[in-house]
Image: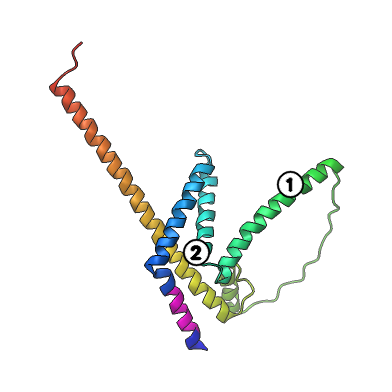
Amino acid sequence: MENVSQDQAKNNQIRWRSAAEQKTYSSKLVEALRHVRRSSPPDNVSSRGRAVREKADKVLAIAAKGRMRWSRAILKKRLKLRLSNHKKAKDRSKLAAAGNSRRKNLKIEVPKKKRLRPLQRRVRVLGRLVPGCRKLSLPNLLEEVTDYIAALEMQVRAMATLTELLTGANAVAGNVAESSNRLEISRQLEHPPQS
């Protein structure tokens, strides 16, 4: 059993490190970032950053093809958000039509929590960090975590490469503009404009 899960974890890491998977993810990420750039207003930086993060996670989940629980959870969350926003808008319109009716505040008594052992606490925290893995057994959770970490590492590599490319392109564009400005200035010095 242990060998099987180790082999599976190794395959997951190899899958996320393959050049084909990296290329597929990178091309999808670039398309998603273009979409964010076109659709979000440039002056609202925080919403744009959130949109970039959401798109990057969604593309990562799509690249995982729903094979792992975390990828299905990310895709399901996006669908739930869309549906809940639609439902909230409907509820608001119903409340506005019915008038201001307030609910009575009910006090709910919450029982005291049992004290967890340190290992159980850490496993629970780990389960909260990986999407869709709150109620998994330890072996399944560890399998999901290894795949999720490998996928995140691939995401970081793709984003770092994209940043380097964009920074390099900006530097090249800046150097070209700077050298064309220098050339124009030198021409003006050699042949001053006649007035």
Q: Is residue 107 or residue 89 the one in the foreground?
A: 89
Instruction: Where is residue 34? Give x, y as percent.
Output: 47, 47
Q: Is mark 2 on a helix, strand or loop?
A: helix
- At x 85%, y 48%, the residue is 102
In the shown orientation, is residue 172 left or right of residue 112?
Answer: left
Q: Is residue 160 or residue 125 the one in the foreground?
A: 160
Q: What stretch is highlighted in magenta?
A: 5-13
The answer to whether 43 is drawn above or below residue 169 in the figure is: above
- At x 51%, y 49%, the residue is 49
Q: What element carries label 1?
A: helix
Inter-mark Cα distance, 1 to 2: 32 Å
Residue 124, visible in the rendered structure: yes
Instruction: Give the class, few, some or many, for how many residues have Cα within 10 Å of label 1's Cα (few <14, many ≥20).
Output: few
The residue carrying mark 1 is 89
- At x 51%, y 67%, the residue is 64
Instruction: Where is residue 168? Give x, y as percent.
Output: 31, 48
Instruction: Where is residue 159? Give x, y as percent.
Output: 41, 56
The residue carrying mark 2 is 63
Give the main secondary structure of the magenta stretch. helix
In the shown orientation, is residue 129 left or right of residue 174?
Answer: right
Q: Is residue 10 magenta?
A: yes
- Mark 2: amino acid: Ala
Question: Which marked residue is nearer to the observer: mark 1 or mark 2?
Answer: 2
Q: Considering only order in the chain, which callout, 2 or 1, is on the residue closer to the N terminus?
A: 2
- At x 52%, y 54%, the residue is 55
Residue 99, visible in the rendered structure: no
In the shown orientation, is residue 95 left or right of residue 147?
Answer: right
| Count of picture labels | 2
The answer to whether 87 is drawn above or below residue 182 in the figure is: below
